[in-house]
Amino acid sequence: MTQPVRPRDADQSSALGRAQDHLKQLVFGGNDGIVTTFAIVAGFAGAGAEGVVEIGALAVLVFGLANLFADAVSMGLGEFLSMRSQNDLYAQRHAAQMARIRRDPAAETALMAGLLQTRGLPERQAVETAQLLAAHPPLMADLTLSWGYGMQAPEDADPALNGVMTFISFVVFGVVPLSPYFVMEPVAATFYTSVAMTLLALMALGVLRWVATRDGLRRALVETVAVGSICALVAFGVGWLVGG
């Protein structure tokens, strides 16, 4: 027998869901930050590599930090504007759907019954369920937008908070490939240290992605590291071709 969800359990589930949503922002923002700044490091390494990598640390830091913060602001604002636009669009579509339900409830109930049948309910049960949903227009509007148009309700997502989380994650993880150049001389070992730290940061992001999605730890690690490595190799190759 299914046990009812107690308020405390619902609160914990909701809190976990919100944490996972923010964790996704950390993963995506962090991945972009790492790839962006390591591309700068790898590009300079490729341009200055002829058997031994010798990079001007100041040049790497200046270009890396400038690119890091510019892209972090762009990513944060982009996330904010994207979510804000999605929320506004959903609100407009939801209001329009509510107006259609009020104007012609029979037609919208029939539409819902059809959608329920496409989801696997027999015709009779679909009609009965649609009639029950017709007594709750906001819920029926949500389901119609989701099943009929592929639009998901924004829930309690805060565009500004998600933008800030993306910015912070981008900066925190993006500074990792640059960090050896703050404390070490610009020699080959510095670049190799940056490579090692970047791989560790990508692995950490893979673990965070697994925590957020539960999509398989090995897959999350391999895909995250592989994407970052491909981008790094491309940047290194371009730097080598241009500077070599």
Image (spheres, helix red, strand yellow):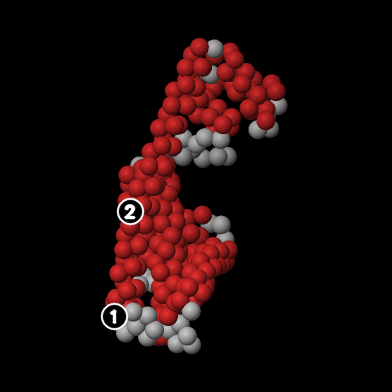
Residue at the disc numbered 1: 183
Characterize the local packing of mark 1: few (<14), some (14-19) or many (20 or more) Cα atoms within 10 angstroms: few
> In the shown orientation, is residue 124 left or right of residue 140?
right
**Residue 19 visible to the viewer:** no
Quarter of the image containing the N terminus?
A: top right
User: What separation in Å lies between label 1 and label 2 (alpha carbons)?
Assistant: 26 Å
Q: Measuring 49% from the left and 64% from the top, which residue is drawn there?
A: 206
Which mark identifies residue 72? none
Q: Is the residue 181 above or below the residue 132 in the image?
A: below
Which residue type carries mark 1?
Val
**Residue 100 visible to the viewer:** yes
Q: Nearer the viewer, residue 46 or 88?
A: 46
Specify the quadrant of the image occupied by residue 114.
top right
Characterize the local packing of mark 2: few (<14), some (14-19) or many (20 or more) Cα atoms within 10 angstroms: some
Specify the quadrant of the image occupied by residue 143.
top right
Q: Measuring 50% from the left and 36% from the top, which residue is drawn there?
A: 152
> In the shown orientation, is residue 20 left or right of residue 165?
right
Residue 51 in picture, x, y percent from top left: 48, 87
Q: Nearer the viewer, residue 24 or 190?
A: 190
